[in-house]
Image (cartoon, rainbow, N blue to C red):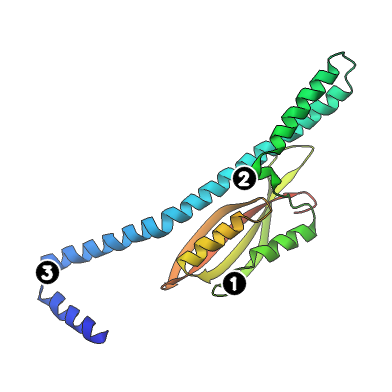
């Protein structure tokens, strides 16, 4: 390896200054585009997909709450069409409940949150978990009847690019409503990187 580097250095020094500058710029551009297409863009797509999913969930929760309110109001209605309205609302409710995202679970107790923390801290043996901690909560205001909030969780770990992608896929398939708030990917010693991830976990008031 050292012999190869020595030969390369000798040949590189024989090149005139202008061509050396062009080679350095070309190498920098190559490294940048490799990082852009192999690291940044795939990670950005995963984060965007997950964030869009959690927005759909919040809208679905709001729609379910609204339908439930209408349902209760219709049950108490003395009109002759009450039964027809109830049937129509039940159909809408059933259709909404078939949404694939609604098979996931809200965090409703502190025990649920501990289960989430445990699942999030589970990763490949080749990866290293540096720290995991719960941060602040923010209200999402989906419904007054079902007050929801996002519990932020910070996860810091060390792993290579492919391990990171597998871990993000694993998080996406957990049975709770999780979304990615932010992700910082810093290569310390190639191929390993230090990754700092902040997650949002959708909770009820008692679960946060």
Q: Residue placed at 80% from the left, 29% from the top? A: 69
Q: Nearer the viewer, residue 67 or 153?
A: 67
Q: Quadrant of the C terminus?
A: bottom right
Q: Is residue 197 left or right of residue 75?
A: left
Residue farthest to the top, as pictured: 80
Distance from the alpha carbon under mark 3 to that under mark 2: 54 Å
Q: Nearer the viewer, mark 3 or mark 1?
A: 1
Q: Secondary structure at mark 3?
A: helix
Q: Which residue is mark 3?
A: 17
Label 1 Cα crowd, 10 Å radius (few <14 / some 14-19 / many 20+): some
| Mark before the other along the chain sequence, 3 or 1 | 3
| Position in image of residue 194 (x %, y %) | 50, 69
Q: Nearer the viewer, residue 87 or 3?
A: 87
Q: Which residue is mark 1?
A: 129
| Position in image of residue 80 (x %, y %) | 87, 13
| Position in image of residue 172 (x %, y %) | 59, 54
Distance from the alpha carbon under mark 3 to that under mark 1: 46 Å
Q: Which residue is mark 2?
A: 54
| Mark before the other along the chain sequence, 2 or 1 | 2
Q: Nearer the viewer, residue 141 or 171?
A: 171
| Mark before the other along the chain sequence, 3 or 2 | 3
| Position in image of residue 108 (x %, y %) | 78, 52
Q: Residue placed at 78% from the left, 49% from the top? A: 205
Q: Relative to 189, say whether 133 is above or below.
A: above
């Amino acid at each position: 390896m050292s012999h190869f580097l020595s030969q390369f250095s000798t040949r590189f020094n024989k090149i005139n200054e202008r061509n050396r500058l062009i080679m350095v710029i070309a190498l920098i551009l190559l490294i940048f585009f490799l990082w852009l297409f192999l690291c940044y863009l795939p990670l950005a797509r995963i984060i965007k997909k997950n964030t869009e999913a959690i927005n759909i969930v919040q809208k679905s929760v709001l729609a379910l709450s609204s339908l439930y309110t209408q349902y209760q109001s219709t049950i108490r209605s003395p009109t002759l069409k009450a039964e027809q309205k109830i049937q129509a609302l039940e159909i809408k409710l059933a259709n909404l409940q078939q949404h694939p995202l609604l098979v996931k679970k809200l965090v409703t107790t502190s025990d649920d949150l501990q289960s989430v923390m445990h699942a999030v801290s589970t990763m490949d043996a080749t990866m290293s978990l540096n720290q995991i901690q719960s941060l602040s909560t923010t209200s999402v205001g989906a419904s007054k009847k079902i007050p929801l909030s996002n519990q932020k969780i910070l996860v810091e770990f060390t792993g290579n690019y492919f391990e990171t992608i597998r871990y993000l896929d694993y998080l996406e398939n957990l049975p709770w409503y999780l979304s990615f708030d932010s992700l910082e990917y810093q290569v310390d010693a190639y191929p390993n990187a230090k990754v700092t991830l902040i997650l949002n976990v959708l909770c009820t008031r008692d679960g946060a």
